[in-house]
Image: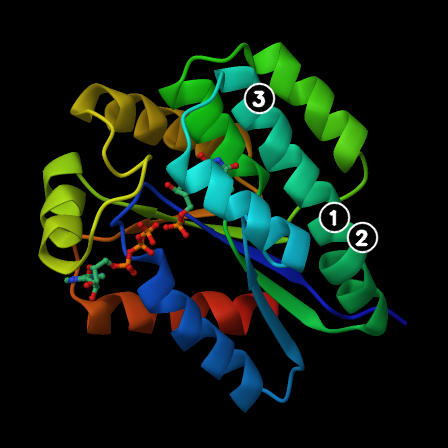
Amino acid sequence: MTTGKFITFEGIDGAGKSTHLAFVAELLCERKKTVVVTREPGGTSLGEELREILLHEKMHLETEALLMFAARREHIAQVIAPALERGDWVISDRFTDATFAYQGGGRKLDRAKLNALEQWVHPHLQPHLTLLFDVPLDVARARLDATRTLDKFEQEKVEFFAATRAEYLRRAAEFPQRFHVIDSTQTIAAIQEQLRVIVAEIDS
Ligand SMILES: Nc1ncnc2c1ncn2[C@@H]1O[C@H](COP(=O)(O)OP(=O)(O)OP(=O)(O)O)[C@@H](O)[C@H]1O
Ligand SMILES: Cc1cn([C@H]2C[C@H](O)[C@@H](COP(=O)(O)O)O2)c(=O)[nH]c1=O
């Protein structure tokens, strides 16, 4: 019997999702789960090649959305579906909510086109739990500026991130049964306490 669950981590760049992903993976390992940690775009060798292109080359917004879903198709076929079938837990740093937020919200691509791609690529797969790390834009920006060289998305203007964040929050309100919105301005320790409770709930 399949017992694995699919958990996704979402948020604008710099919100802190990668920081907490490792912690949740550890919590699940302590609970004796077999955990597959992966990311989008990426997660397969083709997906990682597409990631390089997507994060560094300019392209038409529809090309960008199509490549995100192409990488995702491969990711589901090679990694996510087989792991869930084995009963493993899959934790992915981003999934389809990111396409709705970035290409839909940020770049203003028609949501109907994204719905059609989602229906094509994964009509029967949705995360069991989506953790949305939410922060004001200035906090996210300060965290990014302190830590890294910025990629194509991270160099976008404040309006882009405001629209991306708004679309994430709109989706969280649309799908309250799977989304948990986490106030990522809290300390890392406070967020970890919240994550402990959420993980215990989903594993009960
Ligand atoms: N709650 C927090 N308080 C203070 N600093 C934080 C917090 N969460 C994360 N950070 C710091 O902010 C920086 C960005 O965090 P992280 O890489 O986890 O963000 P991210 O959401 O995964 O970003 P991206 O999507 O661009 O990879 C890191 O230096 C991390 O240590
Ligand atoms: C899956 C997905 C991702 N993006 C963007 C969001 C981020 O800026 C990058 C991924 O980098 P991360 O720091 O590892 O999160 O890609 C996107 O625009 N659309 C998507 O579907």
Q: Secondary structure at mark 1?
A: helix
Crowd around label 2: few <14 · some 14–19 · many ≥20 (10 Å): few
- Residue neighbourhood size for the residue with mark 1, other residues' Cα within 10 Å, grouped as few (<14), some (14–19), many (≥20): some
Badge 1 amino acid:
Glu
Q: Secondary structure at mark 3?
A: helix
Q: Quadrant of ligand 2?
A: top left
Up-down relation of residue 29 to residue 46 (above or below): below
Q: State whether label 2 is within 8 Å of ligand 2.
A: no
Q: Badge 3 local density, few (<14 within 10 Å), some, or many (20+)?
A: few
Task: Tell me the residue at 68%/63% (across/down).
Answer: 5
Residue 72: x and y in percent read: 67, 43
Residue named by callout 1: 74
Residues 128 and 82: in front is 82
| Label 2 with label 1: CB-CB less than 8 Å | yes
Residue assigned mark 2 = 77
Apparent side of residue 13 relative to residue 39 in the rendered image (left or right): left
In the picture of the structure, the residue carrying the numbered disc 3 is: 63
Which of the marked residues, 2 or 3, is nearer the chain's N terminus? 3
Q: Determine whether, in the image, residue 135 is placed left or right of residue 68.
A: left
